[in-house]
Amino acid sequence: MLLALAMIVGGSALATGYDAKLALEKSQAAIGNRFDDVALTDRDGKEFRFASLAGKPAILSMIFTSCHHICPMTTRNLATAVRAARDALGAGSFTVVTIGFDTPNDTPEAMREFAREQGVDLADWYFLSASEETIANISAATGFQFFPTARGFDHINQLTIVDRQTTVYRQVYGVDFELPALVEPLKQLVFDRPEAQGHPLTRLADRVRLFCTVYNPATGRYEIDNSLFIQTAIGFLVIVSAVVFLWRGMRGTNRRMTD
């Protein structure tokens, strides 16, 4: 299934010798890689440092702006998923980065136009250009492979989720991926906040949100389901009540024995 989702886009695999199985293996092998701090350029021509992603989870998407089908579709689907994820996890809970890997053509102006055409105007979503060297470094860190073809590029279709230390945490494959494939790993990272360490109540609140934020297939959205928390609380009260009942019984028995 993963192999099918990670198949090539943009051209002919036979023309380039693209190996989908090898691409998937390299993609998975990248999990655990940590990014170096490199400089990119945002769509307004300003420098963007990769180190600025540290502190909260991020989603990385590699595209080329001259793509007329797969990259636009993936970006629009990602936008829909990002809105749903932020509704569930919080507006500022994670960052999104789209990087153009076709360096001669994916200029800041081209990235700005690409974002406009896909209707993406969300906070904490950056459309970035970079040098060939930087693209090579990012591609190696994410396990992303691409090959030029007569019609554009063949490349693995993946989204890379990185943690608060800019370390590759999970890969998500496919154009029309299932929402939980993206949100579940993000949920684990968002509700594992470093500032909660040493604060039991904050840590408890994060754990409750982690387990009670669940996907509802009927609505296709994430919702807060308090039933698990309520059932746990009821179970705890039942156990406490049973302990109290037994303790009182034993206490009464002891009193009768001493009278």
Image (cartoon, rainbow, N blue to C red):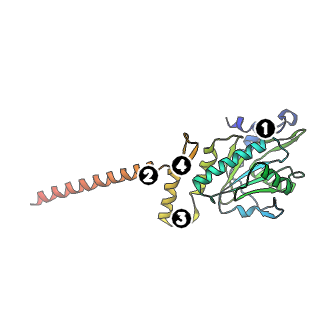
Q: Nearer the viewer, mark 4 or mark 1?
A: 4
Q: Nearer the viewer, mark 3 or mark 1?
A: 1
Residue ID for mark 3: 197
Residue ID for mark 1: 8
Q: Disc number at residue 231?
A: none
The amino acid type of the residue labelled 3 equals Gln
Residue 114 drawn at (x, y percent)? 81, 50
The amino acid type of the residue labelled 2 equals Phe
Q: Earlier in the sequence, mark 2 or mark 4?
A: 4
Q: Nearer the viewer, residue 170 or 218?
A: 218
User: CA–CA distance between discs 4 and 1?
Assistant: 34 Å
Which structural element holds mark 2?
helix
Q: Disc number at residue 223?
A: 4
Q: Earlier in the sequence, mark 3 or mark 1?
A: 1
Q: Nearer the viewer, mark 4 or mark 3?
A: 4
Q: Earlier in the sequence, mark 4 or mark 3?
A: 3
Which structural element holds mark 1?
strand
User: CA–CA distance between discs 4 and 3?
Assistant: 26 Å
Q: Earlier in the sequence, mark 1 or mark 2?
A: 1
Residue ID for mark 2: 229
